[in-house]
Image: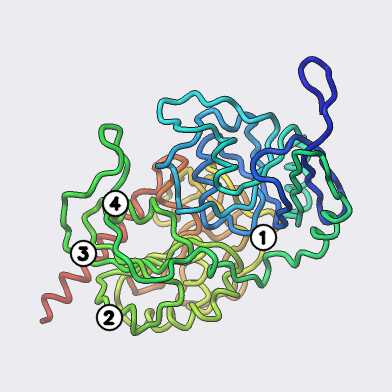
């Protein structure tokens, strides 16, 4: 590792892959050893949202964009109370912040939140390998003194079991029922309390929900109740919701499905609108009789083209997932509504004859464009129709 002056500096961090490949660089953030799945993200902005997205639990994120840190960090751009990702891998040293919303540098934010990172490594080489071979297990070791036990890191990476079969939801879900009241961010006043009252009561089952999903619902005037991932069918019905959102989250859907899918199956017996997002989409598929599969490299970024097969429209989406609903043996009652234009994988489904649908990507799209916001409108229109029919039958 060299400075601009040509002076060589000893490495203070190592990224060690499960096959023994080692990348040496400059350590950033909190010292220590982190072990998880190494993935890459192609987004140019939104690194703070990415690192706090609960869907990244158990993962080390390689950023393909070389200038990370230029907008600093603040207390608003968080998708959860604490970070979820294990650490980050970047090409250059952290860029000095240059943004009017910045309250601290990314470096100090990483340290304050217990996140580790490595800079000055060849992220092109890492990304090319991940694209070619798929996601890899890795150990990230940071030591400001340069005391790097490469063999211990190599052993930890080789012994880590991988995300397949791993239920990570307990580490990121809420622990009790709560109400969410904060709306979307606005330039004039930040996050505001919504003034509109739609009269719609929405339950969000929290498998690791991103705050912007909750904000989008609250901003539409919904009464939003968040329930833990382990909520029973009876606990959900006790809220008497007009609609249900199955949130995003990390890990293997089949593992989380051991306790979540039976509850979702019970919900499918009614005709209440249900909207699944990311992990919620995958578990809705499992509840309907589909299978899920581990992807080679997954989808991680803010530039993924997806086609809505119902309208023909192509939208640019924000994605983070390493599992997907498999095309093989799809049940007859499940219709594919969206597909990735990168690899053709399933990106959306609906249950025929019912107001129940889901998408693999993140319609709240932060970071990323707002192409997918219509999905919230689609869901809330179904909820309004359901509520109207329910009240008309009383």
Circle 1 sits in a helix, a strand or a loop, which is it? strand
In the picture, the quarter occupied by the N terminus is top right
Circle 2 sits in a helix, a strand or a loop, which is it? helix
Front residue of 201/316: it is 201
The mark closer to the camera, 3 or 4, is 4
The picture places residue 243, in percent across and down from the top left corner, at 29, 69
Crowding at mark 2 (Cα within 10 Å: few <14, some 14-19, many 20+):
few
Crowding at mark 1 (Cα within 10 Å: few <14, some 14-19, many 20+):
some
Using residue 245 as the reference point, say whether residue 141 is left or right of it: right
In the picture, the quarter occupied by the C terminus is bottom left
Using residue 355 as the reference point, say whether residue 132 is left or right of it: right
Using residue 17 as the reference point, say whether residue 331 is left or right of it: left
The mark closer to the camera, 3 or 1, is 3
Q: Earlier in the sequence, mark 3 or mark 4?
A: 4
Q: Residue at x 55, y 80 (%)?
A: 258
Q: Residue at x 47, y 83 (%)?
A: 262
Gap in Å between the C-alphas at discs 4 and 1? 35 Å
């Amino acid at each position: 590792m060299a400075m601009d002056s040509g002076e060589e500096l000893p490495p203070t961090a190592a990224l060690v892959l499960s096959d023994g490949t080692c990348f040496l660089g400059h350590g950033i953030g909190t010292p220590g050893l982190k072990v998880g799945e190494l993935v890459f993200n192609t987004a140019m902005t939104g690194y703070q949202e990415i690192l706090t997205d609960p869907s990244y639990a158990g993962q080390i994120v390689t950023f393909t964009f070389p200038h990370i840190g230029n907008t600093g960090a603040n207390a608003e751009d968080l998708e959860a109370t604490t970070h979820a990702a294990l650490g980050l891998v970047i090409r250059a040293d952290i860029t000095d912040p240059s943004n009017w919303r910045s309250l601290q540098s990314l470096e100090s934010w990483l340290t304050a939140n217990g996140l580790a990172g490595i800079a000055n490594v060849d992220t092109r080489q890492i990304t090319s390998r991940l694209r070619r071979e798929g996601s890899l297990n890795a150990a990230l070791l940071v030591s400001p003194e340069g005391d790097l036990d490469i063999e211990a890191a190599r052993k930890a990476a080789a012994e880590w079991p991988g995300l397949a079969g791993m239920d990570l939801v307990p580490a990121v879900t809420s622990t009790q029922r709560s109400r969410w009241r904060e709306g979307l961010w606005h330039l004039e006043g930040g996050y505001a309390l919504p003034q509109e009252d739609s009269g719609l009561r929405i339950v969000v089952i929290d498998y690791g929900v991103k705050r912007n999903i909750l904000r989008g619902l609250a901003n539409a005037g919904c009464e939003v109740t968040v329930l833990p991932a382990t909520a029973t069918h009876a606990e959900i019905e006790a809220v008497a919701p007009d609609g249900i959102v199955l949130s995003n989250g990390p890990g293997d859907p089949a593992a989380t499905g051991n306790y979540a899918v039976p509850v979702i199956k019970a919900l499918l017996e009614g005709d209440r609108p249900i909207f699944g997002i990311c992990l919620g989409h995958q578990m809705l598929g499992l509840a309907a009789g589909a299978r899920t599969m581990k992807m080679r490299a997954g989808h991680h970024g803010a530039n993924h083209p997806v086609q809505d097969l119902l309208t023909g429209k192509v939208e640019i989406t924000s994605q983070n997932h390493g599992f997907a609903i498999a095309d093989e043996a799809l049940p007859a009652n499940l219709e594919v509504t969206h597909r990735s234009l990168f690899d053709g994988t399933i990106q959306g489904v609906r249950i025929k004859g019912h107001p129940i649908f889901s998408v693999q990507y993140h319609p709240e799209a932060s970071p990323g464009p707002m192409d997918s916001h219509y999905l919230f409108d689609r869901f809330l229109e179904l909820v309004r129709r359901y509520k109207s029919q329910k009240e008309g039958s009383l």
